[in-house]
């Protein structure tokens, strides 16, 4: 079975006040919603949100999000009590199709 977790990666943009975060949440649907709400509380204001991909992996659901915000830090202890870590594989891709390799890793349970 897949492991419940929150993975993240932050990239500062050319505009110093804006940051782009990519998040991978693997959990049950209700918990994904709670984690997403807590992320929004930490990242106020969220300027733009994109769901890159979502689906099911080994009995759990996953959601891959791209959020743009002016917040530069997240207190993850207030977001999720489970496994949280930074993951460079969540770096932005040039095209939406560029996520296929990463999504395949999720679907195969290797993430």
Image (cartoon, rainbow, N blue to C red):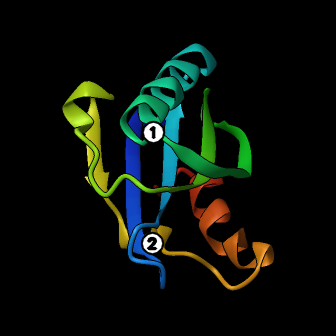
Q: Residue at image x 56%, y 75%?
A: 92
Q: Residue at image x 46%, y 66%?
A: 18
Q: Position of residue 55 (x, y in %)?
A: 73, 40
**Disc with the residue nearer the chain's start (2 vs 1):** 1
Q: Position of residue 71 (x, y in %)?
A: 37, 52
**Element under label 2?**
helix
Q: Is residue 1 visible?
A: no
Pick whichever, 86 or 15, lies toward us.
Answer: 15
**Element under label 1?**
loop
Pick whichever, 89 or 111, lies toward us.
Answer: 89
How much space separates mark 2 and mark 1, taking CA atoms?
25 Å
Q: Is residue 1 above or below residue 37?
A: below
Residue bearing the label numbered 2: 89
Q: Residue at image x 53%, y 50%?
A: 109
Residue bearing the label numbered 1: 44
Is residue 99 toward the left or the right of residue 13 in the image?
Answer: right
Nearer to us: label 2 or label 1: 1
Q: Is residue 7 above or below residue 16?
A: above
Determine crowd level at label 1: few under 14, some 14-19, many 20+ residues with C-alpha closer than 10 A.
Answer: few
Label of residue 67 in the image: none
Is residue 39 toward the left or the right of residue 52 in the image?
Answer: left
Is residue 21 toward the left or the right of residue 29 in the image?
Answer: left
Q: Residue at image x 28%, y 45%?
A: 74
Image-quadrant location for residue 60: top right
Pick whichever, 43 or 21, lies toward us.
Answer: 43
Image-quadrant location for residue 39: top left
Q: Position of residue 24 (x, y in %)?
A: 51, 49
């Amino acid at each position: 079975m897949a492991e419940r977790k929150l993975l993240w990666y932050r990239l500062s943009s050319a505009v110093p006040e804006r940051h782009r975060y990519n998040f991978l949440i693997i959990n049950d649907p209700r918990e994904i919603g709670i984690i997403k709400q807590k992320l929004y509380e930490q990242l106020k204001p969220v300027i733009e949100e994109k769901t890159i991909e979502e689906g099911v992996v080994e009995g759990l659901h996953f959601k891959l999000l791209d959020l743009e915000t002016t917040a530069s830090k997240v207190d993850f202890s207030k977001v999720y009590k489970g496994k949280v870590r930074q993951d460079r594989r969540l770096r932005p891709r040039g095209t939406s199709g560029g996520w296929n390799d990463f999504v395949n890793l999720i679907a195969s349970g290797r993430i």
